[in-house]
């Protein structure tokens, strides 16, 4: 993480959505659309305070259009709008379906126990090679990475850089955060090794080649 008081460089600020409403039994969440839980709203509020601590300055927050991310982004926006240090003013939330979590295809929204029972070999193959394995009708990590990084660069080039804002804030999902960190750090192992629990905030100085 970075301290805004020590640098004037542009930053990419990644926020993972708060905890979604939980099923009694685990499911493959993927792009299945569920809202935040009450605990998740608390995590989003804590993430907003972390943005303030980092001195985040943004007039737009980009977010996955899935409910758990969108609601998190709206909580952040309302808190930033009340921050006098930021000069007040509105913060626009921009939903973007290309920042959705990985598409789990025919497994999306299904109980994990049922998938293990019905497709034991496929389930084991995915566990052995989670980056490369593609669920039928869905994406693997590299499909996700291609989708997300293309959109990240488009947002940076076409919308963020011309605005002159110091911080690009993106609210998304674990897989999306990892793909962007892979790109910024140019280190897949480091990106996968970083813990990103729900409600977490990671601020990264934009590398020179991006600026």
Image (tube, grey):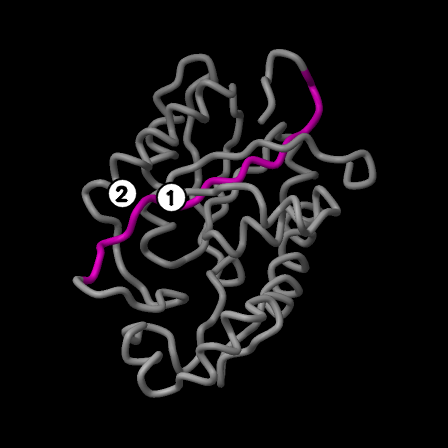
Say if 171 sits above or below 113 in the image: above
In the rendered structure, the answer to whether residue 128 lies left or right of residue 71 reads right
Q: Is residue 164 magenta?
A: no
The image quarter containing residue 78 is: top left
Q: Which residue is mark 1?
A: 198
Q: Residue at x 46, y 50 (%)?
A: 172
Q: Name the residue furthest right.
A: 209
Does the magenta segment cover residue 10?
A: yes
Asked if the residues shown at circle 1 and circle 2 are in contact, with their CB atoms under 8 angstroms apart, the answer is yes
Seen at 59% across and 18% down, the residue is 4
Q: Nearer the viewer, residue 131 or 182?
A: 131
Task: Point out which mark residue 6 bears.
Answer: none
Mark 1 and mark 2 lie on one chain; the one further toward the N terminus is 2
Q: Which mark is residue 40?
A: 2
Relative depth, front residue between 204 and 193:
193
Magenta part of the chain: 7-23
Q: Which SS does the magenta portion mostly show?
A: loop
Residue 26 relative to residue 140: left or right:
left
| 80 relative to 99, above or below | above
Residue 208 percent location from the top left of the image: 81, 34
Give the residue drawn at x 75%, y 47%. Answer: 186
Where residue 22 appears, as percent x and y from the top left, is 22, 56
Q: Is residue 211 above or below residue 133?
A: above
Kindly state the secondary structure of the residue where label 1 is placed.
loop
């Amino acid at each position: 993480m970075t301290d805004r008081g020590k640098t004037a460089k542009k930053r990419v600020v990644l926020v993972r959505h708060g905890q979604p409403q939980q099923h009694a039994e685990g499911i493959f969440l993927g792009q299945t659309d569920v809202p935040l839980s009450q605990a998740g709203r608390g995590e989003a509020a804590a993430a907003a305070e972390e943005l303030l601590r980092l001195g985040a300055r943004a007039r737009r927050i980009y977010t996955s259009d899935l409910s758990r991310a969108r609601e998190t982004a709206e909580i952040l926006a309302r808190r930033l709008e009340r921050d006098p240090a930021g000069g007040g003013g509105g913060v626009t939330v921009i939903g973007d379906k290309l920042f959705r979590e990985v598409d789990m295809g025919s497994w999306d929204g299904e109980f994990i126990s049922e998938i293990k029972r019905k497709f034991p070999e496929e389930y084991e193959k995915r566990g052995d090679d989670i980056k490369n394995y593609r669920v039928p009708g869905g994406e693997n990590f590299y499909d996700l990475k291609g989708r997300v990084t293309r959109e990240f660069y488009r947002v940076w080039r076409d919308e963020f850089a011309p605005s002159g804002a110091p911080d690009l804030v993106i609210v998304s999902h674990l897989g999306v955060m990892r793909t962007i960190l892979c790109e910024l750090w140019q280190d897949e192992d480091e990106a996968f090794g970083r813990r990103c629990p729900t409600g977490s905030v990671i601020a990264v100085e934009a590398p020179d080649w991006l600026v």
